[in-house]
Image: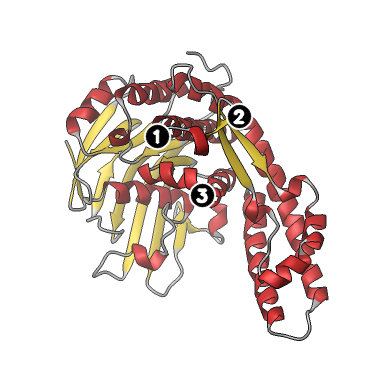
């Protein structure tokens, strides 16, 4: 196939081990891990997805599914703990995450606590894909913005700072707009201040999102064509108020904002219009074409993170094989090999399907069973 845009990487990244206590429905997990593809087999509800989420949490300091930390604690316990050992740049690191009810969580690397959680995000670059992503990404622009944020916070700590600042100020601005509706006066000076802060952070966020989409565009196209047998060329059109003039948009919409009591303009309303062969995927795409787009997008995300971080990102695939036909499964696995994935975790309910998939992967494969939160090596 030959993706000539792929680069050689300065370092490898893989997990050596994972231990967890009290994380969702997982029993005490204690696994030694190696580079390669790890298949976790089990029925639905046994803990396979939670196992992947534990890895995701270790990298991103939050659940992939947006759960509050207190809701992650296993029933009957008042804490959870995750310990990882991982290899990066020929060095071994120890990561420990501790969370106890009503207390702040603590992340430490090599026994030294992080002063800010944001200092950790991006140290273990990874991409995760679940069956629900296929539906939500198609239906919700917020989910598409989430994809942008999940990617960029791993590569740019300044982006994360601006995103947090923008979110904070947006809440304050909306609260002021609601207060103004029940008051005879409006603090326009404070509203101006909020607008100024939103414009400053919003412009930075927009530029980062624009650059990201420009860089992944050729990978998205190439991978989509490969998965579909050259039948589907996928692309994204980006719409943002910041592409015009964000300050002008806030000024123009101020009267409307005061009436509706919310902010009707800004990068929190950015839109990603997904296309196949120039047509709207929402309007004209089949289920198979939608799946092709999302798989290609996630693989492009892996490539982007790997190139920026100069180390291969981890790839987590949750129960995806049950949603794909054999041709797409084969194409996906071929792309994993082509990309030189260092370590990948795949969950499935069908052991025979997983074994057949492993035969198509020119990487070491390992198998585990997950039963009522207990993970054992096959």
Q: Secondary structure at mark 1?
A: helix
Residue 276, numbered label: none
- Placement of 261 over or under 224, stated as above or below: below
Give the quarter of the image for residue 243: top right
- Placement of 235 over or under 117, stated as above or below: above
Name the residue located 39 percent from the left edge and 30 percent from the top edge.
288
- Observer able to see residue 44: yes
Q: Residue furthest front?
A: 283
Q: Residue furthest bottom?
A: 184
Q: Nearer the viewer, residue 239 or 110?
A: 239
Q: Secondary structure at mark 2?
A: helix
In the visual, does 375 lie left or right of 37? left
Name the residue located 48 percent from the left edge and 30 percent from the top edge.
296
Residue 287, numbered label: 1
Precedes in sequence: disc 2 or disc 1:
2
Name the residue located 44 percent from the left edge and 58 percent from the top edge.
66
Q: Nearer the viewer, residue 194 or 82?
A: 194
Nearer mark to the viewer, of 2 and 3: 3
Question: Badge 3: few (under 14), some or many (20 or more) residues near its Cα, within 10 Å?
Answer: few
- For disc 3, the marked residue is 140
Q: How far apart in space, not on screen, are marks 2 and 1 (Cα)?
A: 22 Å
In the visual, does 196 lie left or right of 314? right
Q: How far apart in space, not on screen, are marks 3 and 1 (Cα)?
A: 16 Å
Tell me residue 216's x, y (percent). 59, 31
Residue 217, numbered label: 2
Precedes in sequence: disc 3 or disc 1:
3
């Amino acid at each position: 196939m030959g993706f000539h845009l792929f680069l050689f990487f300065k370092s490898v990244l893989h997990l050596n081990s994972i231990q967890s206590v009290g994380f969702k429905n997982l029993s005490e997990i204690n696994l030694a891990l190696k580079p390669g593809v790890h298949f976790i087999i089990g029925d639905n509800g046994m803990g396979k997805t939670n196992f992947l989420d534990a890895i995701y949490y270790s990298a991103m300091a939050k659940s992939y599914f947006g759960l509050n930390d207190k809701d992650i604690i296993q029933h009957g316990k008042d804490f959870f703990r995750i310990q990882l050992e991982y290899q990066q740049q020929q060095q071994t690191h120890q990561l420990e995450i501790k969370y106890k009810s009503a207390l702040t969580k603590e992340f430490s690397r090599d026994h030294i606590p992080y002063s800010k959680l944001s200092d950790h995000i991006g140290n273990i670059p990874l991409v995760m894909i679940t069956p629900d992503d296929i539906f939500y990404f198609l239906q919700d622009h917020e989910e598409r913005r989430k994809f942008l944020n999940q990617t960029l916070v791993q590569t740019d700590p300044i982006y994360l700072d601006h995103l947090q600042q923008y979110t904070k100020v947006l809440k304050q601005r909306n609260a002021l707009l609601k207060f103004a509706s029940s008051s005879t006066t409006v603090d326009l000076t404070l509203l101006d201040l909020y607008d100024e802060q939103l414009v400053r952070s919003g412009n930075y966020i927009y530029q980062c999102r624009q650059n990201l989409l420009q860089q992944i565009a050729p990978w998205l196209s190439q991978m989509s064509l490969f998965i579909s047998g050259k039948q589907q060329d996928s692309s994204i059109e980006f719409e943002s108020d910041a592409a015009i003039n964000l300050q002008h948009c806030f000024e123009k919409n101020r009267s409307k904002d005061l009436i509706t009591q919310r902010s009707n303009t800004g990068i929190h309303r950015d839109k990603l219009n997904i296309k196949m062969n120039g047509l709207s995927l929402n309007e004209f795409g089949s289920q198979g074409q939608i799946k092709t787009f999302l798989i290609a997008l996630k693989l492009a995300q892996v490539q982007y993170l790997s190139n920026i971080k100069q180390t291969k990102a981890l790839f987590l695939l949750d129960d995806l094989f049950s949603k794909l036909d054999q041709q797409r499964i084969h194409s996906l696995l071929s792309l994993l090999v082509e990309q030189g994935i260092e370590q990948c975790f795949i969950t499935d309910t069908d052991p025979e399907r997983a074994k057949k998939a492993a035969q198509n992967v020119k990487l070491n494969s390992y198998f585990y069973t997950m039963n009522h939160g207990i993970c054992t090596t096959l």
